[in-house]
Image: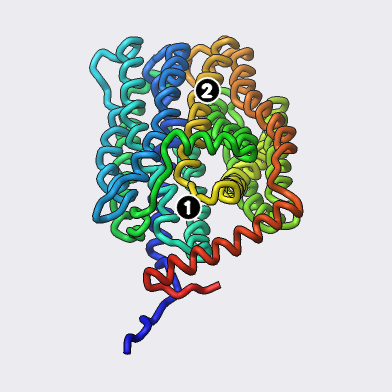
Amino acid sequence: MIETPQLKEEYVPVKSRIWISIADSAAGILQSLVAASALTYYFVKLRGLDTGLAGIVWLIFGIWNAVNDPLFGYISDRTKSKIGRRLPYIRFGAPIFALAFILFWVYIPGSNGNQTMLFIQMLSVLFIYDTLYTAIATSIYIMPYEMAVSNKARSTIYVWKIIFMVFTIVVPMALERFKPDVGDAAGIASFRWLMVGFGIGMAALVFISTFFYREKHFAQEQQQPPFFTAIKECFTNRSFVVFETISFTIIFAQTALMQGIWLYFDELKVSGLPLYIALAAGIVGGVVLWINRRDKWGVKNSTRIMALVFAIGCLTLVLGGHYVIPAAFGFLCFGFGFAGGMYLIPLMNGDVVDFDEHKTGLRREGMYAGINSFITKPAISIAQWALLAIITAFGYDQTLAKGAQSASAQTGVLVGWVVPTGILLLICFFALALYPLAGEKWDEIKEQLSFLHREKEKKYLEEHGYKFVE
């Protein structure tokens, strides 16, 4: 008589949940320093790269930045190895990732003020760095789907990822207090070593993390659709097209606001402590608000409200950014916006993928992640270029010490920092009215998909020795 093997509930160990979240946060911190804060400030303000040339760097880089994500998603979906499809890129890419980050801060003798050398260094290292970042960050983003099959098990990972995601905002803002002034050779040297240390430390965390979680290898056996067919299906999904307006804007906002804050505190001399407290309160309050009101308001309406609050914060800063109280209110709104970006956008993205499954019968998170990055990553370059172009038009002089800019240049810092973001957020508020995944009909589809998921999960889990638990 053959006995049926005892099945157990699928469970992701706490250490695995924590370490994948640490890896996600560590990679995100370095990306924030490169794409949204320290890098442009370092090359423009401290090294002397012309603002126009820096803007061109970001525009040229934006082409590769957009293309490499769907390309890598396609490659990684087809990777086969003893440790999985995603894990090799995270583990073996981490040391090279650290080296690429360090190359940004290496001083080449005679390069200060040399526009050609600075332009080549910034652009070439961006290409190398982002290739490694794409391989690692995309793999980390998809890893929860490889670590667990059941939605119940996956949700335990997302809770930790949200907690650690806060560090990707807080750490770069805290480092702003350590930036040196123009001409401070000792301070600039110390700043370089600080960045080198962060690169090594964060990459080490990414590398170490790979020994605390693993993939379910049966995913390597799944048949993947052709590359261009997968792309076409994404763009025939109307909900995905509308979703991309807010997805693009959130990336733009995070980049512009994190980059501009360094210039803001330099030139307008507003006390930072009350503003940071307001931002933290907004982030914490925002997470609590969106979690508690998500079901009553719905993901669509919650996201529209988030976009409107975020836009109000931008308007407040451009009108009252010289004064602590209105600035603190603006930062409070920013916190609600950042919290919505961390919590609501992934939920909306999940609904978009669910609808695709409803249409096609396929589950294609990886391809949607790649196409989403293809559209949103240019926001990083455009936000950098827009800020630099606007402050230059208002007479910003990169050779001056902190606080020495003209009144016109100070206005330019405010305008370049928040106005483009505010306009995009208002556009999103109205565009999201066209988002179709809401209401009773969508709730019915979600219920059907939930039943289908339960059946798929039960089959997968029991085939691989796990007990299905509702």
What secondary structure is found at the residue carrying circle 1? Answer: helix
The nearer-to-camera label among 2 and 1 is: 2
What is the crowding at mark 2: few (fewer than 14 residues within 10 Å), some, or many (at least 20)? some
34 or 82, nearer to the observer: 82
For label 2, the residue is 382
232 or 217, nearer to the observer: 232
Q: In which quarter of the image is the C terminus?
A: bottom right
Q: Colour scheme used in the picture? A: rainbow
For label 1, the residue is 164
465, above or below 114, in the image: below
Residue 36 in view: no
Q: In which quarter of the image is the N terminus?
A: bottom left
Which numbered tag is attached to residue 383? Answer: none
- Disc 2 to disc 1: CB gap under 8 Å: no
Q: In this view, does 1 lie to the left or right of 279?
A: left
Please tell me which residue is depicted at 60% across the width and 61% down the height of the picture.
Answer: 450
